[in-house]
Image: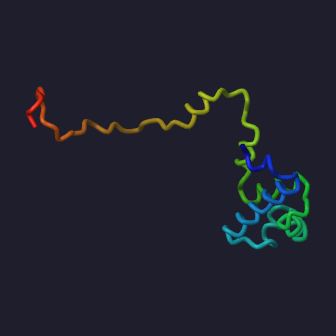
Amino acid sequence: MSTYNLLTDEQIEASLCGQLEAERLRRNITQTELARQAGVSVRTIRRMEKGEGVSLATFIRTMKALNLEDRLETLFPDQSIQPIERVRKTMQVRERASGTRKSGKPTGDWHWGDE
């Protein structure tokens, strides 16, 4: 069960906005710089970080300014792609062969008591 099931809408919003604030601080970006990059006012960023409510558009602009827009795709993945296709897309293509590894074990038939 998700912890979000137990929270109110306001608590979820505050949690998500708090995560954006933590990311901003982790990257050492000021509220003023983030506001400029997102195209919103500093007051809007302050309100958002306090969990006082912002529009979805502002939230998305802030995510884009922090280069987190790829995380939006996890909310609603493309339904036209089947789960097995997602796995195949993430698999890396081998570029080199590893060759044969020597196991260090003696070759030949093994019998009980040959240890």
How many badges with numbers are in the image?
0
Looking at the picture, the colour scheme in use is rainbow
x and y percentages locating residue 44 in the rendered image: 90, 66
**Image height of 108 relative to 53, above or below:** above
Q: Residue at x 8, y 33 (%)?
A: 114
| Camera-nearest residue between 91 and 2 | 2
Residue 40 lies left or right of residue 81; in this view the side is right
**Image height of 62 relative to 78, above or below:** below
Residue 2 lies left or right of residue 61; in this view the side is left
Image quadrant in which you'd find residue 73: top right
x and y percentages locating residue 4 in the rendered image: 78, 49
Q: Which image quarter holds the C terminus?
A: top left
**Image height of 112 relative to 41, above or below:** above
Q: Residue at x 72, y 27 (%)?
A: 80
Image quadrant in which you'd find residue 110: top left
Work out which residue is located at the far left of the displayed protein and give it: 114
Q: Residue at x 77, y 56 (%)?
A: 63
x and y percentages locating residue 28 in the rendered image: 68, 72
**Image height of 66 relative to 97, above or below:** below
x and y percentages locating residue 38 in the rendered image: 82, 61
Work out which residue is located at the far front of the displayed protein and give it: 113
Q: Which image quarter holds the N terminus?
A: top right
Q: Residue at x 89, y 67 (%)?
A: 47
